[in-house]
Amino acid sequence: MTVTGAEAASLVSAIRHRRFLTDEIESAFANEIKIEYRGNYWSVLNCAAYYNRFSILRLLLKNEKLINQRDLDTSLHIAAEQDHSGVVELLLKHEANIEYENNDGETPLLSAVKYENEDIVEILIEEGAYVNARDNFDRTSLHIACEEGFLRIVKLLLHAGAAINWRNASGCTPLFCAADLSRVNVVKLLIQRGADVKIPDNSRNTVLHVCVKRRNKVLIELSLQNGADVNGRNVNGIDIFHLAHVDYEMSDFAKFLVRLILCLNINTPKPEHHNSGGFLGFWDACKSELELMETCKIAESNISYKQLFLESDKSKLAVYLSNADIVSELDALVYKKKFPIYEQYFTENIMKGKSRLRLHYEADEVMNYISPLLPIVVRRKIYDYLSDVDFNNLINAKQHKCDKSQIMYVTGADAASLISEIRHRRFISDEIESAFANEIKIEYRRNYWSVLNCAAYYGNVSILRILLKNEKLIKQTDLDTSLCIAAEKDHCTVVEVLLKHEANIESENSIGDTTLLIAVKCGNENIVKILIDEKANVNAEDLCGNTSLHVACEKGFLGIIKLLLHAGAAINLQNVRGRTPLFCAADFNRVHVVKLLLHRGADVKIRDPFGSTVLHICFQRRNKVLTKLLLQNGADVKSCTNYDENDILDLAYFDFTDFSKFLISLILYLNVNTPISERHNSGDFSRFWDACKSELELMETYKIAESNISYRQLCLESNKSKLAAYLSNADVVSELDALLYKEKFPIYKRYFTENIMKGKSILRLHYEADAVMNRISPLLPIVVRRKIYNYLSDDDLKIFNYFEPVQV
């Protein structure tokens, strides 16, 4: 069965906007109803997975008899695509098929890779997903990751054993895919991990063919350096020299290709079938220059021009250029005359060497400060392991006048390097594992973190999982602190992983907040759900005696408050100041929270150590809305404070203001028979009291437009549907529109105006709903329709009226 229109919209809205689970959602789940929404046909479980609604998913999945395997599997795909890691883990716990294929033949792992959802990829790999599964085009996850250039995912897949040389339907390997789309970093990684550059596609094109066709010089050099065949031909007999058009003209690109091939292997034989004069002449010229380089020494040293030309190690280049005679000859640019074809290669290497040498000299100044007795040879050996970024960190340390320990932090296994690796999700390095094993604390922005703390802070699940595999190194305090950090930063998956490794769910931070209190203070609703499901103590208190409910009420987090109350949070517990959650909500004017707490039975009469009730707070704040709510729910106006023994009416009597008038009119509106105290029976206070009472008694005797409805009924009515029924009488509306009530009842005229507006608003919604109902069920009596409308909120009616019914 498929639902559409208003019913579908209502179900989607309930799931999407995190409402508490309704009977309609449970019914739709039980009856396997499909929801047609924006061109998709979803089950309730699919919809909850799409919108990442933990609470709904958990409740639905508790009823195992109703779980449909296909529904579970489809939901897993949806969650993998949408990057909802917590949902994926939950569905896998309920035995969703990790290898289930969608219409495109994609498993959840393939879908996660396709959308670059790295955390999902990690979870699926850990849960045993087959990394070499293929889609309908014979692509594996590695093919897709390489095509898209997702470097970190490529690393994860290779680490998990992905086949590096498998071919897809077109015969392309992952390396071929990466090269075809110029993914330079991916190509470098694949070659480093042993990818075969010689494997051809179905047309016998190799990676080198693709790189030459794309004119990608960086990838051509990489391919040739790693054994690409320069003479390989495709099915049409085309080799790379054909693609470079060497037989027609020796373009700059053609010259680059020949220069590079001979530079890497001077003994490469001349290719057959390419006999144009320009090509052969340039080939011979390149070979002659390279042979000459071998015999020429620089400035009578033992270093040949060939050595300088071919050297790729920056530190060795720096050593060559530390010789003043060599630098002198190179600065004279003699090499440009001797080797005109390869002069660019010399220039680039000289610049690299000088740049590195300059960094060496600047680093020496810092090292003179740290370890002045360290020999220069040892220093140079240290420098060999440093990148240019590491050098800059070391050099900048001196400018900031750091002490020795701080300088050592920015060199080697230092804070900045570790933070950078963890923060930017790089593959875990030896430095990170070493820092974890040795319990190194990282000083960063005035925090002192362990590696585990840092991974939790940045939500880096991959590093976290790898570190936690070594159980012998895990410290309980480190686990607990990391849990607090993850709860604060709203990292759901990190929290779940730490809890699996027995982090203490009741651990406290330095100010006495439990994990749940931290999550509540930060408004992290999903974390709160997870912790409640894991049986966190919802009534745990901070140093001020505040529970999670106190905090949520103070901040106005309505969704979290509902979760806490549903989990059994004590609604009337007092903190060290004697304040209940209702006090906190009222003090910060959280109207919706106060309404919810009163609906759930919060006690309005509880007093703090000074004898004040919530009503005292609302009176001090002159808050009319909350004052009315409290009085409607039994607040005692005669409750006295300890310090002056004055009740609310005493305060209104001594300071007779407009708010005092509002209070009197409200008290008598709620109970016209409320007696006036003897001590208040004088002056303006008593006169206004009597005036209010007279107006209310007069209302009872006046009927509206000779109907059976008295003005008193209209003034006191709180039911919107009844107000709508009153205003469906044309004579009643006519008299009210004449505004006679404003002259007859000047004190309570505002109550009439508000109720008339409410009634007209709901009546208009009823008429609009009737227009829809006339098309759905034209024979349904108006009385029955009104009965149905009574069960709908204003929002439900608006949704119903907005959507046109679909003809089935």
Image (cartoon, rainbow, N blue to C red):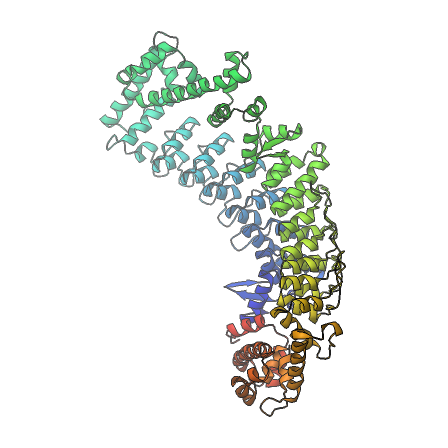
In the image, taking residue 289 as reference, residue 313 lies left or right, namely right
Across the whole image, how many numbered discs are drawn on residues? 0
Instruction: Evaluate whether residue 535 shows in this view.
Output: yes
| Front residue (pair 167, 755) | 755
In the image, taking residue 649 as reference, residue 386 lies left or right, namely left
Query: Residue 269: percent from the left, percent from the top?
Result: 34, 22
In the image, taking residue 487 as reference, residue 164 lies left or right, namely left
Q: Is residue 528 above or below residue 369?
A: below
Q: Is residue 328 above or below residue 784?
A: above
Query: Residue 408: percent from the left, percent from the top?
Result: 57, 23
| Front residue (pair 203, 300) | 300
Query: Residue 174: percent from the left, percent from the top?
Result: 48, 39
Q: Is residue 69 above or below residue 310?
A: below
Residue, x 63% and y 46% (percent of image)?
Answer: 488
| Front residue (pair 228, 579) | 579
Q: Is residue 284 above or below residue 245?
A: above
Residue farthest bottom in this picture: 706
Instruction: Evaluate whether residue 162 shows in this view.
Output: no
Residue, x 37% and y 10% (percent of image)?
Answer: 324
Residue farthest front in this picture: 683
Query: Residue 400: percent from the left, percent from the top?
Result: 50, 26
Can you say which quadrant of the picture contains the N terminus?
A: bottom right
